[in-house]
Image (tube, helix red, strand yellow):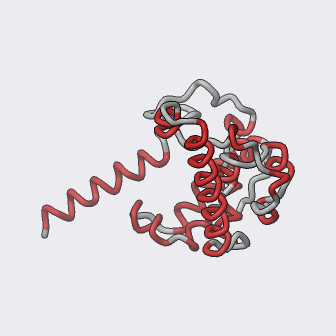
Amino acid sequence: MKMFALNFMKRSYIKDSHIHHLNVDDSSRWLSIQEVYPGLMASDTIKELLPHQKESFLERCREWYREAVKQLYRRINLDDPVLQSLSHLKPSAIVNETSSITAAATIASGLPCITTMLNVNAQQIDRQWRSLLADENIISGQWKGNCSSTEYCSGGKNILQAELKQNQTAKQSWCKYS
């Protein structure tokens, strides 16, 4: 929601406001029409418009963004525990030790498609999450710049890669017998 709002509202207002309290109808919080961001592709095209066409186009963009934010508010429960738990997955939350130990379990149980897609159970996700929170290399920030996509920061294999490899082996074995 904040991403849409940043396209037509003042950054200071969005930064200082909680996501629950953005008032997209308060025109005193809007950017000037010339500052409305129409998107990358439209930014190039808009240069070819006459001034009054450009203003009209940017006003329609602002109206679209306002309606998008309103629709998101209507359709998404911002108090949903799963959504709230997602903020605990940020690396800064892990490093600053503000991340909840139960965040992964909440997400895994609230989004069962993740466990199905990865072919893991919620207990495995919870165990791996808690091991990340206890890893001193991660908490101390020693992992920064020392990781590639094929290695785990403390020198072992990436947990997710190991899980995927294990799942692939299991699928290959199962296919032999089916």
In this rendered view, identify the residue nearer to me: 99 or 3: 3
In depth, the one of 145 and 168 nearer the eye is: 145
Q: Position of residue 45 (x, y in %)?
A: 46, 35
Question: 16 left or right of 173?
Answer: right
The residue located at (34%, 57%) in the rendering is 167
How many numbered callouts? 0
Quadrant location of the C terminus in the rendered image: bottom left
- Whole-percent x, y for residue 135 in the image: 67, 42
From the image, which quarter does the N terminus lie in?
Answer: bottom right
Residue in front for this viewpoint, 101 or 78: 78
Tell me residue 19's x, y (percent).
77, 60
Residue 67, compared with residue 128, is above or below; it is below
User: Which residue is located at x 67 percent, y 68 percent?
Assistant: 70
Seen in the picture, residue 110 relative to 16 is either above or below; the reply is below
Identified at 69% across, 62% down, the residue is 85
Name the side, left or right, on which 9 lies relative to 59. Answer: right
Residue at the location (48% across, 41% down)?
A: 158
User: Between residues 68 and 109, which one lies in front from this camera angle?
Assistant: 68
Give the side of residue 139 with respect to residue 28, left or right.
left
Q: Is residue 132 above or below residue 41?
A: below
Percent coordinates x, y for residue 17 in the rendering: 84, 55
Image-quadrant location for residue 23: bottom right
